[in-house]
């Protein structure tokens, strides 16, 4: 009996349209989390009468707001992709993150994926003919269509 190792093929990889929709949805979710966390800090500061917290959140500069958003983005992708192999965008488009052999990515792969996303030009890496961006290539991961992937894995 011959044992074949499973490999992700091009027909399983999510389309550019799915990837773009993932990006837009996840960007919106990260923005909402960022605003929600800022509002929660402000409300907690008001309730506890610790006005320094409220004052701090209100007086953040543009650079500090961007850094705050990047921290939220980092933990959003790290937690969602490590525990679920999916983000809210990927749930909506029915896609998921896997390694080259079809297994769930390890924490190292997810950390690399997430850090590479911080590179400002990363979203433009999808403009080439390649269906994989820098954060996929450098972390040796793939975003696949979940239903196609499951049907192939059953075989």
Image (tube, rainbow, N blue to C red):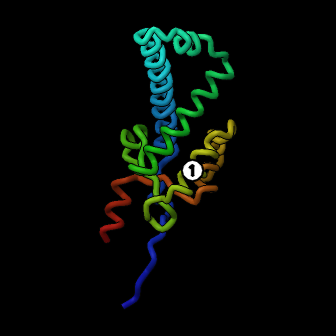
**Residue sitting at 30 percent across and 68 percent down?**
154
**Residue sitting at 61 percent across and 53 percent down?**
130
In the displayed image of the protein, which residue is found farthest to the front? 49
Judging by the rendered image, the residue that carries numbered circle 1 is 111
Above or below for 23 versus 138: above
Q: In which quarter of the image is the C terminus?
A: bottom left
Foreground residue, 58 or 110? 58
Neighbor class of circle 1 (other Cα within 10 Å; few <14, some 14-19, many 20+) is many
**Residue sitting at 50 percent across and 25 percent down?**
34
Position in image of residue 19 (x %, y %): 50, 43
Q: Is mark 1 on a helix, strand or loop?
A: helix
**Residue sitting at 45 percent across and 77 percent down?**
5
Horizontally, residue 130 falls left or right of residue 102, namely right
Q: In which quarter of the image is the N terminus?
A: bottom left
Position in image of residue 30 (x %, y %): 49, 30
Foreground residue, 51 or 73? 51
Horizontally, residue 133 falls left or right of residue 11, namely right
Position in image of residue 91 (x %, y %): 37, 42
Q: How many numbered discs, if any? A: 1
Quadrant position of residue 6: bottom left
Position in image of residue 121 (x %, y %): 69, 39
């Amino acid at each position: 009996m011959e044992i074949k190792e499973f490999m992700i093929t091009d027909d399983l990889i999510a389309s550019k349209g799915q990837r773009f929709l993932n990006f837009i949805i996840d960007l919106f979710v990260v923005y909402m989390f960022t605003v929600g966390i800022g509002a929660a800090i402000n409300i907690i500061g008001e309730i506890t009468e610790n006005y320094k917290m409220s004052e701090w959140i209100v007086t953040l500069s543009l650079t500090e707001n961007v850094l705050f958003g990047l921290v939220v983005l980092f933990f959003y992708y790290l937690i969602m992709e490590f525990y679920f192999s999916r983000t809210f965008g990927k749930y909506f488009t029915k896609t998921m993150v896997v390694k080259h052999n079809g297994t769930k990515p390890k924490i190292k792969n997810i950390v690399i994926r997430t850090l590479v996303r911080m590179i400002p030009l990363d979203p433009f890496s999808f403009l080439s003919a390649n269906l994989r961006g820098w954060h996929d290539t450098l972390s040796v991961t793939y975003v696949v269509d979940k239903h196609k992937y499951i049907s192939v894995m059953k075989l």
